[in-house]
Amino acid sequence: MNTHRMNPKHQSILDAARGLFWKHGFRRVSVEEICREAGVSKMTFYRHFGNKIELAKEVYHREAVEGVEQFRQIMSDETTTTRQKMEAMLRMKMEGTNEISKEFLNDFYQSPELGLSAYVEEISTQIWNEIVADFRTAQEKGWLRDDFKPEAFLLMSYKLLELITDDRMQQMYDSPQDLVMELSRLFTYGIVPYEK
């Protein structure tokens, strides 16, 4: 494990980069801007990260891990109904996509030359494979339809990325967040149990 990760300056750089990347994408943000926002020198930046790509990957990884932890807390809460769980997940998604920009979506999901889209796909696959097991547990408890296939859900989620980055879809919504939330609502409520 990277020994810098618990360092407050390391965390400050991650936080600053996350905010800037979400608002402006990867390409439009410079190391200088990240350092200014984090209140650190470039020398400190390069002590913690080899380059901006390494930083972007760690920012994305941190977000993904925190998202999985929140998802598992929501799913393991025995006191809430399925609908309440779905609503909590949507609130979590809303918070995670707050201030997300079209540039972020394009840079992280559609620009193979940066290497970020491949990384996002790799991390997403790892996380979704873990979540499949959580979905199976939820099915056993009756929280999700027993006839829905978590693996198919995973494949469909990848296809949603194509919709999220499609210019025609983006033009239909006021912001990328509105589009992500609409697709999330459609996707999420489609797995709630129903009367047979």
Image: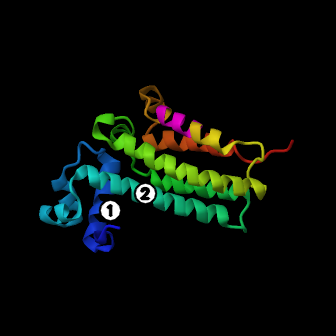
Residue 157 horizontal/vertical position (percent) = 55, 40
Question: Mark 1 packing: few (<14 Cα in 10 Å), some, or many (20+)?
Answer: some
Q: Nearer the viewer, residue 8 or 179?
A: 8
Which stretch did the figure color magenta? Answer: 156-162
Q: Is residue 136 left or right of residue 58?
A: right
Q: Residue at x 26, y 63 (%)?
A: 13
What residue is pinned by disc 1?
15
Of residues 122 and 177, the one nearer the viewer is 122
Check the picture and name the quadrant holding the N terminus.
bottom left
Please report whichever mark, 2 or 1, sits nearer to the chain's N-terminal start. 1
Name the side, left or right, on which 177 lies relative to 47: right
Q: Is residue 158 magenta?
A: yes
Q: At x 40% / y 59%, what residue is drawn?
A: 62
In the image, residue 39 above or below residue 175: below
Can residue 46 be seen in the rendering of this structure? yes
Query: What type is the residue that disc 1 sits on?
Result: Asp
Instruction: Compare residues 100 and 156 and report the one nearer the observer.
Output: 156
Q: Residues within 10 Å of mark 2 (few under 14, many from 20)?
A: some
Picture quarter with the C terminus: top right
Q: Position of residue 94 (x, y in %)?
A: 51, 52
Q: Determine the main secondary structure of the stretch shown in magenta.
A: helix
Label 2 belongs to which residue? 63
Q: Percent from the top left, x then y, of residue 92? A: 53, 57
Of badges 2 and 1, the one in the foreground is 2
**Amino acid under label 2?**
Glu
The spot of residue 161 in percent (x, y) is 48, 37
Relative height, residue 157 to residue 14 (above, below): above
Q: Residue at position x 43%, y 33% from top?
A: 165
Residue 181: which disc? Answer: none
**Which residue is depicted at the point 57% across and 44% down?**
184
